[in-house]
Image (spheres, coloured by chain):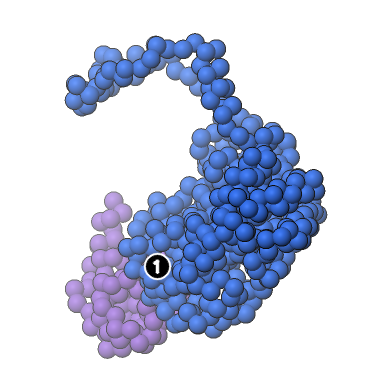
Chain colours: A purple, B blue
C-alpha cells in the first residue's frame, strides 16, 4: 500500500497536501472500492469548502462512496479529468487523481503517514 | 426456475430446528384474540360453483373484444397484440412474480431486458434505456428525480406544459412535494391553443427540467426543437413524454435534442386491462447514465469468453448508494417489458410504421367525417396523430350515453380536467377501428346533436 510521507490523512481515507492545497482519495480507499467507474466532483471553483463536507461522489463496480473535504479553504481548482477518466483514481490516486485544490487550506486532526498506515493495517485484520 | 415443494417431513424438520412444535407457535407475538379471528364467511363453494359465480360476475363487464367499439384513448390505446406476445409471456421460464437477476441462472430474462432496452433506444432516438418503470406517469416523475440529482438540488424549478397528461402532472406533484421543487406551467386554465414556445418564458437559470408531451394530451404534434434549444440555453434539461407508436412515424424527440424521452409503453403489446399493470419506458443520454434511476442490463463476456448479460452500474442504485441514490425505485415491469420487446420484434421497424400509419389515416378520416356533422367541429388546427379534440353541441356525458346505447365507447371528457374545454371530447382512433365503425360513430354523433 502506498502512503506517501509528505501527505496528511483523514479517518475517512482522504489525503491532503499542505504544500499544494490538493486533496483526494487514498490508495487504501481506491483499493477497497476496486474498479472505479464514476466520479462526480460536487464542489466548484470559488466555493468555500469546509473540512468534513462532501467534495465528490465515487462509484465503483461494487460500491459507492462519498469523499469528504480534508481541509477548510476556498476551492481554487477541481480535477475535470476525473469525470471522463475515473480510472485515474485507481492508477494514480495521489498524482493525476487529485480531486480538489484549496487556497490557504486549514486542516486539523489529520494523521501523518505513519499513523495512517497503522490505521489502515488495523482495519485489514 | 424449478418448482420445489416442501414435504410435511421437511416442515417438521424446519420447525424442530427453530425450536417450535407446530406452525401456530410462530404467531405467538400476535395477541391471542387477533390470532385466529372468526371470519364469518359463507359456506365454501365447490370449484364448479365458484367458477360459475365468477363467470356470471364477469359477464356484467362490457369489454372491447366483442361487446363495444372503442374510441377512448387519453393515454391508453387499443392496439392489436399478436398472439406470439402472450405465448412468450406465458412460458414458465419468464412467468415469475419477480425478475431473477442472478446472471448465472437468469440469462434469458437479462437478455430479454437488454433487447427491450435496445429496441426502446432505437424507437426514441436516444442512447440508453433503463429496464423500465411502473407506467408513463412514474417515468415522468423519475425524470424530475434525475434532473434534481443532476443539479444536486441547486435548481429548484420544473416547468411542465399544461398539455401533459393530467394524471402524469398529478403524479409529478405527488413526487415533488417535500423535495423543495416548484412546478411552473402546471395550469389547466392556461391558453391551450399555444404551441410549445409558450413555455419558453417560464424557463430560467433555476429551471432543472422542462417536461412536454409528444404528441400532447390532445393528440397534437409540434416540432419541439426550438423549445429544447431555449431550455438548453438556460442550462435546463428537457424530458419528452412520448407516445411510442407515434415515434415510428414522426421525428424522434432524440433527434430534436431531448435529454430524456419517457412514456407509457402500454401501446406496445400490452392489453388495456382496466388500467394496468402497464410499463413506463425511460431513456436518456449516456452522459447522464449515472443519474438515471432504475435497473440497467448490459452486455459482457463471461469467463469463457461467451456473450452474456448482467445488471450493470448498480452502484448508483439505492441498495448501494442509499439515500444519495437518484431514486428509491429499482424494480421494473419485467414481464411487461418482455411483452414490449416481443411486440416490437414481431412488428419490426416496418410493421410498427404500418400500425402508426393506419392510426394516422383512420384518425384523419374520422376527424374529416365528424367535422362535417352539424354541431360538431374540431377544437384545434394543429397537426395531430391518432387522437383529436371535438367540440360537441351537448355535454360529452350525454354524447357518450347515446354512443353507449349503440355499443360505442365514446371519447374522453376533457372538461373534467380543463375548465375551458367543457363539452369537448378527445377521440382516439387506432388500427383496430374499421371504416364501418368510424361511419357508425359519425352517424350516432349526428343523432346525438340534441337531447
Residue drawn at (62%, 59%), measured in percent from left and top?
B393
In-front residue for pair B282/A115: B282
In-front residue for pair B350/B266: B266
Residue drawn at (52%, 69%), measured in percent from left and top?
B161
Badge 1: how crowded within 10 Å, few (<14), some, or many (20+)? Answer: some
To which chain does the residue with label 1 belong?
A
Question: What secondary structure is marked by label 1?
Answer: strand
Q: Is B63 situated left or right of B436 in this image?
A: left
In-front residue for pair A37/B334: B334
In-front residue for pair A24/B409: B409
**Residue B39 position in % (x across, y down):** 31, 19
Q: Is B335 situated left or right of B122 in this image?
A: left
Whether residue B189 is visible? yes
Picture quadrant of residue B263: bottom right
Residue drawn at (41%, 61%), measured in percent from left and top?
B173
Query: Furthest-front residue in view?
Result: B451
**Residue B125 position in % (x across, y down):** 67, 64
Picture quadrant of residue B24: top left
Q: Circle 1 is placed at which residue position?
A: A57
Whether residue B142 is visible? no
**Residue B101 position in % (x across, y down):** 52, 42
Give the total number of marks visible in the rendering.
1
**Residue A19 position in % (x across, y down):** 31, 86
Quarter placement of the N terminus of chain B: top right
Q: Is A82 situated left or right of B307 in this image?
A: left
Residue drawn at (26%, 78%), measured in percent from left and top?
A50
Q: Is residue B308 above or below residue B423?
A: above
Amino acid at each position: 500500500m502506498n502512503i506517501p510521507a509528505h501527505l496528511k490523512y483523514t479517518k475517512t481515507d482522504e489525503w491532503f497536501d499542505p504544500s499544494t492545497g490538493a486533496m483526494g482519495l487514498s490508495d487504501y480507499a481506491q483499493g477497497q472500492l476496486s474498479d472505479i467507474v464514476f466520479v462526480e466532483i460536487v464542489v466548484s471553483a470559488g466555493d468555500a469548502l469546509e473540512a468534513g463536507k462532501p467534495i465528490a461522489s465515487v462509484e465503483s463496480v461494487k460500491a459507492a462512496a462519498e469523499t469528504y473535504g480534508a481541509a477548510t479553504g476556498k476551492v481554487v481548482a477541481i480535477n475535470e479529468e476525473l469525470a471522463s477518466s475515473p480510472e485515474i483514481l485507481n492508477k494514480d490516486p495521489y498524482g493525476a487523481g487529485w480531486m480538489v485544490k484549496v487556497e490557504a487550506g486549514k486542516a486539523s486532526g489529520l494523521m501523518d503517514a505513519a499513523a495512517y498506515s497503522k490505521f489502515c493495517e488495523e482495519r485489514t485484520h | 426456475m424449478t418448482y420445489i415443494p416442501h414435504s410435511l417431513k421437511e416442515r417438521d424438520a424446519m420447525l424442530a430446528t427453530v425450536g417450535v412444535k407446530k406452525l401456530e407457535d410462530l404467531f405467538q407475538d400476535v395477541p391471542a384474540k387477533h390470532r385466529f379471528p372468526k371470519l364469518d364467511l359463507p359456506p365454501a363453494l365447490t370449484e364448479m360453483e365458484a367458477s360459475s359465480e365468477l363467470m356470471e360476475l364477469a359477464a356484467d363487464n362490457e369489454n372491447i373484444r366483442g361487446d363495444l367499439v372503442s374510441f377512448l384513448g387519453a393515454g391508453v390505446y387499443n392496439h392489436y397484440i399478436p398472439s406470439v406476445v402472450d405465448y412468450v409471456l406465458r412460458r414458465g421460464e419468464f412467468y415469475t412474480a419477480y425478475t431473477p437477476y442472478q446472471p448465472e441462472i437468469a440469462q434469458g430474462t437479462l437478455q430479454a431486458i437488454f433487447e427491450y432496452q435496445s429496441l426502446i433506444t432505437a424507437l426514441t432516438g436516444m442512447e440508453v434505456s433503463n429496464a423500465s418503470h411502473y407506467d408513463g406517469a412514474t417515468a415522468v416523475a423519475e425524470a424530475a428525480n434525475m434532473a434534481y440529482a443532476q443539479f444536486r438540488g441547486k435548481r429548484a424549478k420544473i416547468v411542465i406544459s399544461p398539455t401533459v397528461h393530467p394524471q402524469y402532472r398529478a403524479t409529478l406533484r405527488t413526487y415533488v412535494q417535500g423535495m423543495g421543487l416548484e412546478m411552473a406551467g402546471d395550469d389547466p386554465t392556461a391558453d391551450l391553443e399555444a404551441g410549445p414556445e409558450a413555455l419558453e418564458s417560464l424557463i430560467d437559470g433555476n429551471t432543472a427540467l422542462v417536461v412536454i408531451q409528444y404528441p400532447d394530451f390532445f393528440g397534437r404534434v409540434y416540432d419541439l426543437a426550438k423549445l429544447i434549444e431555449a431550455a438548453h440555453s438556460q442550462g435546463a434539461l428537457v424530458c419528452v413524454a412520448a407516445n411510442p407508436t407515434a415515434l415510428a412515424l414522426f421525428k424522434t424527440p432524440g433527434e430534436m435534442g431531448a435529454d430524456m424521452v419517457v412514456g407509457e409503453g402500454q401501446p406496445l403489446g400490452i392489453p388495456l386491462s382496466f388500467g394496468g399493470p402497464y410499463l413506463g419506458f425511460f431513456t436518456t443520454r449516456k452522459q447522464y447514465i449515472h443519474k438515471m434511476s432504475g435497473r440497467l442490463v448490459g452486455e459482457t463476456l463471461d469467463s469463457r469468453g461467451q456473450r452474456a448479460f448482467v445488471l450493470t452500474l448498480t452502484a448508483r442504485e439505492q441498495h448501494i448508494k442509499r439515500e444519495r441514490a437518484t431514486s428509491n425505485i429499482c424494480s421494473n415491469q419485467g414481464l411487461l417489458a418482455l411483452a414490449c420487446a416481443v411486440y416490437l420484434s414481431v412488428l419490426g421497424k416496418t410493421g410498427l410504421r404500418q400500425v402508426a400509419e393506419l392510426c394516422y389515416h383512420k384518425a384523419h378520416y374520422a376527424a374529416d367525417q365528424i367535422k362535417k356533422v352539424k354541431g360538431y367541429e374540431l377544437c384545434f388546427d394543429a397537426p395531430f396523430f391518432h387522437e383529436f379534440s371535438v367540440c360537441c353541441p351537448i355535454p360529452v356525458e350525454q354524447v357518450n350515453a347515446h354512443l353507449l346505447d349503440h355499443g360505442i365507447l365514446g371519447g374522453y371528457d376533457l372538461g373534467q380536467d380543463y375548465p375551458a374545454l367543457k363539452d369537448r371530447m378527445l377521440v382516439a382512433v387506432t388500427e383496430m377501428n374499421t371504416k364501418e365503425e368510424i361511419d357508425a360513430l359519425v352517424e350516432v354523433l349526428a343523432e346525438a346533436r340534441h337531447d
